[in-house]
Amino acid sequence: MPHPVFVCAHGAGGHKDDRGMLRLAQALAPYLDVQRFNFPYSAAGSRRPDPMPLLKDAFRNAVPEGKHIIGGRSMGGRVASMLAAESFPCAGLLLFAYPLHPAGQPEKLRDAHLPKIRVPVLCFNGTRDALCTRELMERAVSGLPNWRMHWLEGADHSFRVLKSSGRTDADVDAEIGRAVLSWR
């Protein structure tokens, strides 16, 4: 039986073949058919993200016919979550390093649309993520029936862990794979 399709978008400073996206695709490959794409600005070689309407249009156009899982890393996941909040037809959301707020600016939350999401959500964030304070994220998703948070202990925004943690990036990747398998 074929794996479910997961259309996965990159973060603001990346592209579909950056190290983080390839690492994520490899961790998910046993469980999902991961389809990555570039947003227009990244495809053009720019580092400056497109305006949100253009990002959403690009994401819509990247999804093949049918109801698939959508999501991505950081900004890519945020774009997918906004589409889901607008009732874009999808089977669920997989979010990796959701950027709840800009680094150092926890008062600028990016959560207003989250209660409008009606599909199942599995969101991974590291406990050392400068763009997602755990307390604020727990408060933002508290009471959302379709939302499941998975905290990666000691991981940062790139899901890297300190050597002193006793964990490796491979351990984090395996944890992600197990959580996705139990979620599906």
Image (cartoon, grey):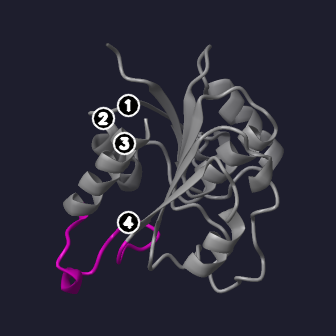
* SS class, disc 3: helix
Asked if marks 1 and 2 touch (Cβ < 8 Å), the reply is yes
Asked if marks 2 and 3 touch (Cβ < 8 Å), the reply is no
Residue at which label 4 appears: 159
Q: CA gap, disc 3 to disc 4?
A: 20 Å
Residue at which label 1 appears: 32
Residue sitting at the far left: 166
Residue type, label 1 = Leu
Mark with earlier residue (1, 4): 1
Q: CA gap, disc 1 to disc 3?
A: 12 Å
Q: Nearer the viewer, mark 3 or mark 4?
A: 3
Residues packed near mark 3 inside 10 Å, few (<14), some (14 to 19) or many (20 plus) = few
Report the disc number at residue 182. Answer: 3
Dividing the picture into quadrants, the one containing residue 91 is: top right
Quarter of the image with the N terminus is: top left
Residues packed near mark 1 inside 10 Å, few (<14), some (14 to 19) or many (20 plus) = many
